[in-house]
Amino acid sequence: MKDLGFSPADILVPREGIDLEKWAVVACDQFTSDRSYWEKAEEFIKDAPSTLHITLPEVYLEDDDKKERITRIDRTMEKYLSDGVFRTLPSSFVLVERRTETGTRFGLVGKLDLEEYDYSPDSLSLIRATEGTILSRIPPRKEIRKNAVLEVPHIMVLISDPDRAVIERLRDKRDTLEIAYDTELMLGGGHLTGYIVSSDEDVSEVLSAIERIYSGLDRSNPLLFAMGDGNHSLATAKSSWEDIKKTLSEEERKDHPARYALVEIENIFDEGLMFEPIHRVFFGLSLDKFDNVLGRFCASIRKHDEADLDDAVKAINGKSGCFIVTDRSGRFTVYETGGTEKSLSAWIIQSVIDALLEENACRVDYIHGKDETIALAKEDGNIGIILPDIHKETFFEAILRDKAYPRKTFSIGHAEEKRYYMEARRIVR
């Protein structure tokens, strides 16, 4: 069978007796402007074993105590291993069932071969980024991974499987599989169940189904695995592996644990997989300044106000170069731009962001959820940008045609519906 970069792993899950609701924490790149969320998580967890103690929420990345936090993370990982917090699922996949307010989705946890991954903008690798990778974001994340003995994944990778042969076959027989974990998730995350997939028959059928997808791809542009969430986390794992690889012999490189990254793959055709645009908030920027910079990249700008958010969203969805601007006035102004170099709304806004940051004119954050964006935009001096929906039916085609989207164009579900940390894997010998 052809090695296509995805395989079973020795997966670590919490042993019996661990409070799983306190163990599982939402991805660290969520709620980056909302410290209160993480304070609530800390208050709920306290000193119980938790992935909060072995990850660094990005809201704290710029704090003065970052190095002390990383040292504590490294020590806690070692302690969890020595204290027997984990049990090992050898050479296994984990079928993931995630129930949220918007529906139920399924995924499969296994390891990706970083040798098959290239995050450069013009990549034609089997595994590739779907959004622009900001190289400056990698070094601070490598610092966190540098001395870590474990990885805990929030990475979600998409496959295009219209025949529903890779994951859905396991979904339909999950009642026959052993449960690895089953828990409610804290702070509105829904419910999470994991099923162990380890039999030779099941593993072989998964790999054979992936090979059938590969057989239908254009060999000159064989996009098999497209990043869904955690783009910079996978890029960090890749960059770290490239550093480690230099110290190894050819034989040692073949099976070194750092060569791989634990991820969850999901079928883009899963009915429970909800794509959400990621919106933008400019902090400390006037509307006049925004319009002025936007005008550098557009031949024309037309605007009209909508009193209702739903009407404004309808006015931009399915149209090129359109987005909504809102501020403390509470108005929803629909912008329609023309004569731009690229028609995708996210690319137009990214041009504005790049220009403003080069001038040090403001601060920018990327926000999951319209309500959160509107709330931040109501603060004096802020501007919120609401972007149109992403259509998953044409997602792979767009990547094949246009390469990567701008960074943080989309996410899978609302913030609370993102992947929660549950499984772990050793990344040192």
Image (cartoon, rainbow, N blue to C red):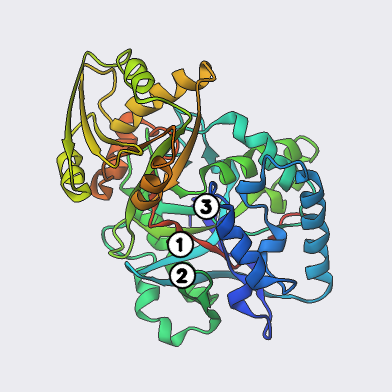
Label 2 sits on residue:
188
Residue 254 sits above or below residue 100 on the image: above
Mark 3: which amino acid?
A: Phe
Badge 1 amino acid: Glu
Comparing 46 with 138, the one in front is 46
How far across and down, in percent of the image, does residue 136 sit? 61, 29
196 and 193: which is toward the camera: 193
User: In the drawing, does residue 126 fall left or right of residue 303?
Assistant: right
**Image quarter of residue 88:** bottom right
Q: Is residue 413 above or below residue 342?
A: below
User: Circles 2 and 3: CB distance less than 8 Å?
Assistant: no
Q: Residue 31, labelled with which disc?
A: 3
Residue 172 horizontal side relative to residue 262, left or right: left
Tag count? 3
Residue 147 percent coordinates (x, y): 80, 49
Q: Give, as a three-letter code, the residue at label 2.
A: Gly
Q: Earlier in the sequence, mark 2 or mark 1?
A: 2
Relative to 71, say whether 404 is above or below. Answer: above
Q: Is mark 1 on a helix, strand or loop?
A: helix
Neighbours of disc 2 within 10 Å: few (<14), some (14-19), many (20+): few
Res 401 visible: yes
Q: What residue did someone put label 1 on?
A: 416
Calculate the distance from the C-alpha at mark 2 to the C-alpha at mark 3: 13 Å
Residue drawn at (52%, 53%) of the image: 155
Corner quadrant of residue 406: top left
Determine contact: label 2, label 1, CB under 8 Å: yes
Q: Position of residue 229 (x, y in %)?
A: 47, 50
Element under disc 2:
loop
